[in-house]
């Protein structure tokens, strides 16, 4: 029987949604409310190849949920709200409490709120979204889909930091990793396209968007990933530094008399492509500046590619080889030049990009004789959420 499943991604001032008919995986409607908390919130609503956009006052997430439900009824996407049988919520941090998507009861919800300590910008907002839907749709099951859960299969020798052990025991300081829903989705999609069981493939998935992370996948499980205790770690990103020598922070703090929160701002919002290039956090802008001869922009792109190559090499060693390299996220899916520079001079490792296939943005872009397949896969975290809701709640 067809189920109508909602996938929700709640941000501090936004609410993204997609309504699916499952198991057909058909999108019935999707949209976004931005500037929640303002008189001029923006509501974008798309259904049946039509798109509506309007400005309206939206006080909070509860009101945003009401707007979404009213729009679904008004445009005849549903006749009654009871038709929505379950709602899947993207949740940033599942800590060690959640190693898979989970049905949300009172205990799970309070666990998500407690984990707000590890993800203060995200978990409280995610919990707010869950509460808003529980109130508006009391009949519908709620499922939490955690960015960290997929990486809970990492072993301690990969997730521990070499800090005094008590920081792990007492404060939960360890590597968690993020983007798990995306890595899981593209790995499964790629295995399906190849017609091979996922568990037979050694995969490195490169999710390259504003945030970027790599994931090593063996026997269908995440065995390593580049983000860490927070989504700041790993490769350089739009505005995030990625890994740096941690001693830089106390050094700068003393030199410039900066507070911890200013340092946080520096490495989260003023670094990465933006900080290095001085141009923009947007890969396209930096590419354009580099092509016009801006040396700092060229260097920013080179650093971005180099860090990714470092992780590819490291994961290839960890897995004892590689079958598939996957590119996804806004940059991975679209930027031919990013893929070209990341794959440059890796032929010795069996990674040989075919320039024509890469330029044509084909799904598989390796040369015919290459031992490693290189795949470009569009990620779809919302669909993965809807699939998980079906698996966990229906
Ligand atoms: P988010 O992490 O916010 O979901 P996206 O996955 O949408 O971000 O990725 C955004 C990034 O993708 C930006 O840096 C943008 O410049 C880059 N991008 C999008 N389209 C292209 C393109 N055609 N060529 C190069 N980069 C692109």
Image (tube, helix red, strand yellow):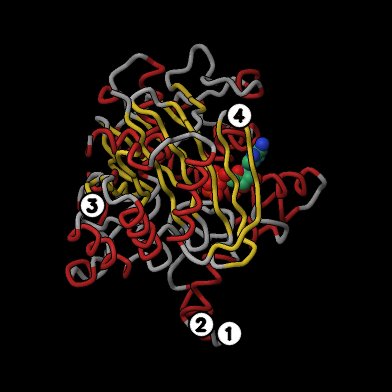
Mark 1 = which residue?
A: 256
The answer to whether mark 2 and mark 1 are in CB contact below 8 A is: yes
Question: Looking at this rendering, what residue extends furthest in the right direction?
Answer: 292
Does the residue tagged 3 have its C-beta within 8 Å of any atom of ligand 1? no
Asked if residue 337 lies left or right of residue 97, the reply is right
Sequence-wise, which precedes: disc 4 or disc 2?
A: 4
4 or 1: mark nearer the eye = 4
In this view of the protein, which residue sits in the foreground, 185 or 357? 185
Look at mark 3 in the image and give the residue it sits on: 104
Residue at 37% of width from left, 58% of height from top? 132
Give the SS element for disc 3.
loop
Q: Which is nearer the N-term, disc 1 or disc 3?
A: 3
Instruction: Specify the farthest residue to the top.
Output: 368
Quarter of the rendering occupied by the N terminus:
top left
Q: Nearer the viewer, residue 52 or 338?
A: 52
The Cα–Cα distance between marks 4 and 2, rounded to whole angstroms, is 52 Å
Q: Residues within 10 Å of mark 1 (few under 14, many from 20)?
A: few
Q: CA distance from mark 4 to mark 3?
A: 33 Å
Q: Quadrant of the C terminus?
A: top left
Residue at image mark 2 = 253
Pointer 2 residue Cβ closer than 8 Å to ligand 1? no
Residue at the spot 44% in from the left edge and 73% down from the top edge: 247
Query: CA separation, marks 3 and 2?
Result: 42 Å
**Picture layout, residue 278 above or below residue 366:** below
Mark number for residue 49? 4
Residue 9: percent from left, percent from top = 43, 50
Front one among 222 and 84: 84
Labels 3, 2: front one: 3
Find numbered disc 2 in the image and state the secondary structure of the residue it sits on: helix
SS at circle 1 = helix
Residue 368 at least partly seen: yes
């Amino acid at each position: 029987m067809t189920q109508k499943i909602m996938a929700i991604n709640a941000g501090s001032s936004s609410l993204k949604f997609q309504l699916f008919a499952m198991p057909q995986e058909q999108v019935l409607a999707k949209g976004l409310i931005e500037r929640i908390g303002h008189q001029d919130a923006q509501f974008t609503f798309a259904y049946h190849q039509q798109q509506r956009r309007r400005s309206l006052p939206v006080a909070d997430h509860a009101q945003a949920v009401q707007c979404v439900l009213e729009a679904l009824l008004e445009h005849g996407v549903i006749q009654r709200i009871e038709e929505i049988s379950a709602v899947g919520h993207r949740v940033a941090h599942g800590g060690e409490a959640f190693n898979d998507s989970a049905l949300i009861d009172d205990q799970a919800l309070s666990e998500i709120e407690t984990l707000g300590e590890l993800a203060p910008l995200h978990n409280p907002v995610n919990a707010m979204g869950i509460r808003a839907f529980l109130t508006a749709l009391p009949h519908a099951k709620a499922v939490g889909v955690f960015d960290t859960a997929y990486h809970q299969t990492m072993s301690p020798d990969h997730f521990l930091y070499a800090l005094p052990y008590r920081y792990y025991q007492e404060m939960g300081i360890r590597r968690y990793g993020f983007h798990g829903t995306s890595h899981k989705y593209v790995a499964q999609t790629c295995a399906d396209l190849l017609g091979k069981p996922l568990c037979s493939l050694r995969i490195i998935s490169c999710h390259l968007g504003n945030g970027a992370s790599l994931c090593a996948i063996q026997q269908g499980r995440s065995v390593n990933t580049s983000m860490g205790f927070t989504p700041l770690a790993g490769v350089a990103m739009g505005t995030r530094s990625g890994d740096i020598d941690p001693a830089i922070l106390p050094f700068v703090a003393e030199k410039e008399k900066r507070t911890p929160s200013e340092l946080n701002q520096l490495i989260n919002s003023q670094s990465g492509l933006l900080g290095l290039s001085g141009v923009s956090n947007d890969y396209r802008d930096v590419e354009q500046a580099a092509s016009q001869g801006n040396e700092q922009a060229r260097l920013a792109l080179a650093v971005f590619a180099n860090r990714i190559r470092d992780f590819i090499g490291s994961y290839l060693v960890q897995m004892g080889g590689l079958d598939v390299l996957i590119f996804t996220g806004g940059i991975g899916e679209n930027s031919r030049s990013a893929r070209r520079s990341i794959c440059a001079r890796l032929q010795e490792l069996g990674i040989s990009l075919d320039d024509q296939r890469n330029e044509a943005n084909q799904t598989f872009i390796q040369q015919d004789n290459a031992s490693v397949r290189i795949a470009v896969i569009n990620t779809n975290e919302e669909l993965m959420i809807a699939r998980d809701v079906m698996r966990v709640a229906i």
